[in-house]
């Protein structure tokens, strides 16, 4: 470790570089932020876990946004879960939601964990980078391939962007003595990014040279030894984890970036949506003279007089 920094205890992303190579990475720790997201939704556990993984994923990917903007991860499928969405806004605001087919609640509960293939089945994943009205929106789409979100993400980067990627994600409920169990999520990823070293441009990241290939294979193999306990343990410092994995090559951690729970819904936005309904539709939504709407991302209730 070339330098040490005071890290926040939780809810942060730590970007890093392995040795003097083109291997760049990020690790993320989510405590109260992901607990708040998952507790508000109260989905069946396997879906909560998958959404927690998606939250850790989008946070690590979004941390690369260089300007104001938003990274949106979306997966759609024809399984019991129809959609999961997680988005990260530059500056660190994270939110996430999912929708499932109402009659499939019990089927979701039968999953042994965040089994992507079981929960979403056939479908696709979409990454959208939205950098505001001035900039062109970037969107990558690939079929959902793999039993887990980790495998599907590696496939996404291989097919859509030709970037070698290795990733580990973990979600679980941990409890401190005498406390209610709290959701936590963690992740770590590395990518081979020669463009960032100035020698080659992004998109030409294929492994061209033999020594590149060796550097990459070594970094990916080490990353894949990171276990869920190491990614979730609040007592294991993120820098210590990096050191455990990459002490042979040396590893340099950059500035940590804070993550917070943040939804962009407002009363005004909800009114604008309601304005688009017909009078009949609004009548149908009225109960006891009130229209009650809930933000699907954060479950915040909005109540209006009819
Ligand atoms: Zn909201």
Image (spheres, rainbow, N blue to C red):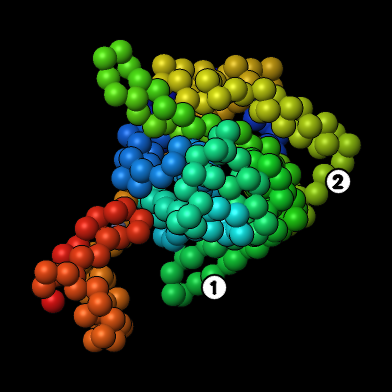
Residue identified by numbered label 2: 208
The residue sitting at 55% across, 25% down in the picture is 228
Q: Is residue 80 above or below residue 207?
A: below
Seen from the viewer's position, the closer of residues 222 and 113 is: 113
Image quadrant containing the C terminus: bottom left
Horizontal side, residue 275 vs residue 212: left or right: left
Res 203 quadrant in image: bottom right
Q: Which label belongs to residue 92?
A: none
Seen from the viewer's position, the closer of residues 73 and 204 is: 73
Secondary structure of the residue carrying tag 2 is loop
Residue occupying the far bottom of the picture: 279
Q: Tell which tag, 1 or 2, sits nearer the viewer.
A: 1
Residue 27 appears anywhere in the view: no
Residue identified by numbered label 1: 136
The residue sitting at 60% across, 54% down in the picture is 79
Seen from the viewer's position, the closer of residues 199 and 205 is: 205
């Amino acid at each position: 470790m070339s330098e040490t920094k005071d890290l926040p205890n939780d809810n942060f992303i730590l970007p890093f570089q392995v040795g003097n190579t083109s291997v760049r990475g990020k690790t993320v720790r989510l405590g109260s932020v992901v607990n708040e997201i998952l507790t508000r939704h109260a989905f069946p556990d396997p879906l909560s876990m998958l959404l927690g993984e998606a939250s850790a994923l989008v946070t690590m990917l979004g941390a690369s946004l260089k300007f104001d903007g938003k990274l949106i991860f979306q997966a759609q499928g024809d399984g019991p879960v129809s959609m999961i969405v997680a988005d990260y806004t530059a500056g660190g605001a994270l939110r996430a939601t999912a929708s499932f087919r109402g009659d499939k609640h019990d089927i979701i509960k039968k999953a042994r964990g965040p089994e992507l293939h079981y929960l979403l089945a056939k479908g696709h994943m979409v990454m959208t980078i939205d950098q505001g009205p001035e900039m062109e929106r970037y969107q990558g789409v690939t079929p959902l391939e793999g039993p887990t979100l980790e495998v599907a993400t590696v496939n996404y980067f291989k097919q859509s962007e030709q970037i070698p990627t290795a990733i580990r994600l973990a979600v679980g409920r941990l409890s401190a003595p005498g406390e209610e169990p709290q959701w936590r999520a963690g992740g770590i990823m590395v990518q081979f990014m020669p463009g960032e070293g100035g020698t080659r441009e992004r998109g030409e990241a294929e492994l061209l040279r033999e020594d590149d290939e060796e550097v990459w294979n070594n970094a990916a193999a080490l990353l894949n030894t990171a276990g869920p306990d190491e990614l979730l343990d609040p007592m294991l410092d993120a820098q210590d984890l990096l050191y455990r994995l990459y002490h042979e090559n040396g590893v340099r951690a950059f500035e940590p970036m804070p993550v917070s729970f943040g939804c962009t819904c407002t009363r005004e936005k909800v009114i604008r949506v309601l304005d688009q309904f017909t009078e009949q539709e609004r009548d149908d939504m009225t109960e006891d003279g009130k229209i009650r709407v809930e933000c699907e991302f954060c479950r915040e209730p909005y109540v209006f007089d009819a």
